[in-house]
Image (tube, coloured by chain):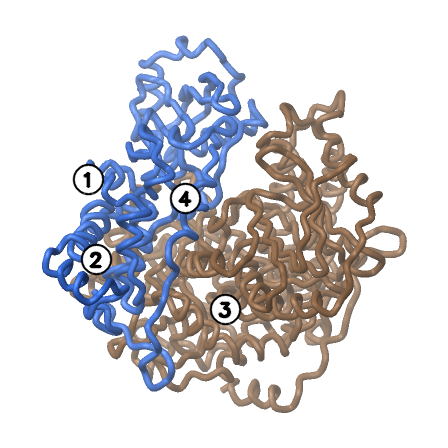
Amino acid sequence: MTYQIVDHDVLVIGAGGAGLRAAIEAAATGVSVGVVCKSLLGKAHTVMAEGGVAAALGNVDDRDSWRVHFADTMRGGQYVNNWRMAELHAREAPDRVRELEAWGALFDRTADGRILQRNFGGHRYPRLAHVGDRTGLEMIRTLQDHGIHKGMDVHMECTVLTLLRDGDRIAGAFAYDRERGRFRIFRAKSVIVATGGIGRAYSITSNSWEYTGDGHALAYLAGADLQDMEFVQFHPTGMIWPPSVRGILVTEGVRGEGGVLRNRDGKRFMFDNIPDNYKPQTADSEEEGWRYTQGDKSARRPPELLTRDHVARMIVREVKEGRGSPHGGVYLDISWIKERLPNAAEHIRKKLPSMYHQFMQLAGIDITKEAMEIGPTTHYIMGGIRVNGDSQMSTVPGLFACGECAAGLHGANRLGGNSLSDLLVFGKRAGEHAARFAMERSAVTIDEGEVDEAASRALAPFARRGGSDGPFQVQESLQVAMQNHVGIVRTEHEMERALTEIDALTRRAEQVLVPGNREFNPGWHTALDLRHLLIVSEAITRSALARRESRGGHFRDDYPEKDEAFGTFNHVVRVGGDGMMRVEREAIAPLPGELAAIIEEMKS
Amino acid sequence: MTAPTTGAVDAYTAAQAAQDDAVGHGTRAFRVWRGADGAGAFHDYVADVDEGMVVLDAIQQIQASHANDLAVRWNCKAGKCGSCSAEINGKPKLMCMTRLDELPTDEPVTVEPMRAFPHVRDLVTDVSWNFRVKPRIQPFTPRAPDAPDGTWRIAQEDVERVQEFRKCIECFLCQDVCHVLRDHHLHDEFVGPRYLVYVAALEMHPLDIADRTTELKDQFGLGYCNITKCCTTVCPEHITITDNAIIPLKERVVDRHYDPLRALVRLVRGARKHDSRDTPGSKR
């Protein structure tokens, strides 16, 4: 077969915040940069980020510094983070945020005209630069509008099927355009994967159709290591009613602004169980918690602002023990602040405009008057492609990863606001290093056999006869299996069942039929995405089985305690010699003395 | 799940729909435009409905059960990304934010692609023209940082002045409904409401010092807008496009280019990009 060939020095896969930031940086070096994305430009999941971007600017509380941010990130991640990434992230995030402002982003302001920062779970001081509750939109639009003038070529609505290699090196990607279904070869000296998450592996998720773990699976199949795939973040507050909105995110900013969690009996259950390592930093009383949200520097944070993994599990416990709300969640109430603030309704509408609109329009709930019904929703994966902390290069030369699909920064649990800063800091680094890699290397050669094989595999669903499954049915079965068996609370028995189901679904996926033709055919697109979704589901399940302890986003009902022995290594998922998926252990490098001292100092 | 009922939609009576609606679930009839490259027809489907369902839920259900190849764009499903624009019962709307219980129950819900853009397939149109317009607009150009720490001080009220425009989710519904584009096809001469809002956001940005009034007049076709306010009506973000963005831009252009006194000054002193009002920090 002959294909259209597009040449770039650096190819970026994904146009969310991380991909765009990487592309901007690479283009600034003068190399040729191409960006491919599954949707239209500016529609990626970054747009959904609400609460803010974490950076120790110290504008609201001058006790904040990169050292506190570093320690918060490590504590939140239960110390299996890549400490080098946590350090770089904390040090560089403030410059990345200020740079965004110089590119036109407009954040809310302090009284003296600096960037305002808000409280968020797990952050010791008010740290999240924000624009009401639509920070993600502001960020992606700023990056998009800046980027289009920087000389990058954007290939919209184009999906990558496989990464191409030239010997051990990466050589580009093979893709199809969604509109006409035509194949396209992207030849590139380096490739940056910035494809986001895996939320579509679960039935209750805040993620859109796009998040099928493409980057994870593409990198895995190209020989790269994945890391800590068991750590999936279930955001504590997703909408649960009416059914059509189930999973849609409710920002943590609601709690940052004083919102509280209550069970059916009206009790603030978060005070019932505060983990030891957070006790010194957590409020003793409702009164102290309220003062914290209103900026009283002598007060400690309310337990609603503990880390997401803990809050999600507490909600699940309330529901399981029969104290949940009518639709299987709990109540999140911001309207109560009217007891404390004059003009509370106006204040809520101003601070949380899109939450107000979202509940009014979709649930018929006025959040200034009533409590919201919420429950956990699959939101983010901490695990991902294993990368070098400085360069973001994976274990495959020339293949880089940044943003959600890269592992390391967040360890076992991500703090809210750290993903927007992650994508800025490491998007920039990936772009810089991928451009340098491309400049220092000779041209690549495409293996036509590899391309032809991918093309015929992609067209197979049209040619099959006899099967009865459609792609949406297989996807739904997988989502149900993962939701039920590899969700917030996990056991060996359940996960073994999941593996059996994934195996059966893999075979069903190889037999799905697709009607119609190659032109903008979502059935076909879903069939092709299934391969990636199944690989990441297997990687999550196998890693979760191997981690016989509970840590961060990974909770085992059969091993409910943290086991220090598991805190000394990362899980690495790679293709074994027999072609089967293997989960191995890689020791975590010892913390340098300076960083270890910071962590000790911040424990009090 | 009900089987496809092409041609059988009449059997679905208004009484039945009203009854189902009263209990919050049941089925609803849909007429979905299907076809490619402009040719096509309405196809009839029935979807199961639940409390609180939006049009996009029904389309996804139809796609998953009856029509795997039904082409539709969507992403966030929460009114934040602006992907699922369509014409519902003839009105430009986001499918994810249009609840079925807002629509009349005595007739099928019609769902069509945006009609102002070239048709690709089913509910998907070619909106790429929009993405070509934006790079033609002078990018954000900040004044030099003037705070001691190398950044800027900005008042919250100056941020709020442009927040309204920056809420735009680029759904292009305003472009779809604008008669200059939809009926007169003046895409080469007129950038449309979305990009006038974009220019307004830049022009009123507290740090920006570029002047886009000449382009507004000569290249972006600002004069074509005759303030019918259709764009404002359809905006899902409730941006007051005409009153707050377009009219102030028109005033700026008039002020800059048609003020006789200024014209005289320009004639005497030669045309300059900026006049004295555009000194750093004085922008409004």
Cα separation between marks 1 and 2: 33 Å
Q: Amino acid at mark 4?
A: Gly
Q: Is A469 left, or right, of B212 in this rendering?
A: right
Labels 4 and 2 positioned on one and the same chain: no
Same subunit, labels 1 and 2: the answer reads no
Pick whichever, A40 or A412, lies toward us.
A40
Nearer the observer: mark 1 or 4; the answer is: 1
| Chain hosting mark 2 | A
Regarding residue A175, the answer to whether it shows in the image is yes
Label 4 resides on the chain identified as B
Which badge, 3 or 2, is on the more N-terminal residue? 2
Instruction: Find numbered disc 4 in the image and state the secondary structure of the residue it sits on.
Output: loop
Above or below, A278 against A312 in this view is: below
Q: Quadrant of residue A428?
A: bottom right
Residue in the foreground of this view, choosing between B208 and A22: B208
Of the residues shown, which amino acid type is indicated by label 2? Ala
Instruction: Kindly tell me whether residue A493 is visible in this rendering.
Output: no
Q: In the rendering, what colour is chain A?
A: brown
Q: Which mark is residue B227?
A: 1
Q: Are marks 1 and 3 on the same chain?
A: no
Q: Tell me whether circle 3 and circle 2 mark residues in contact (CB < 8 Å).
A: no
Residue receiving disc 2 = A345
Q: Which mark is residue A421?
A: 3
Q: Are marks 1 and 4 on the same chain?
A: yes
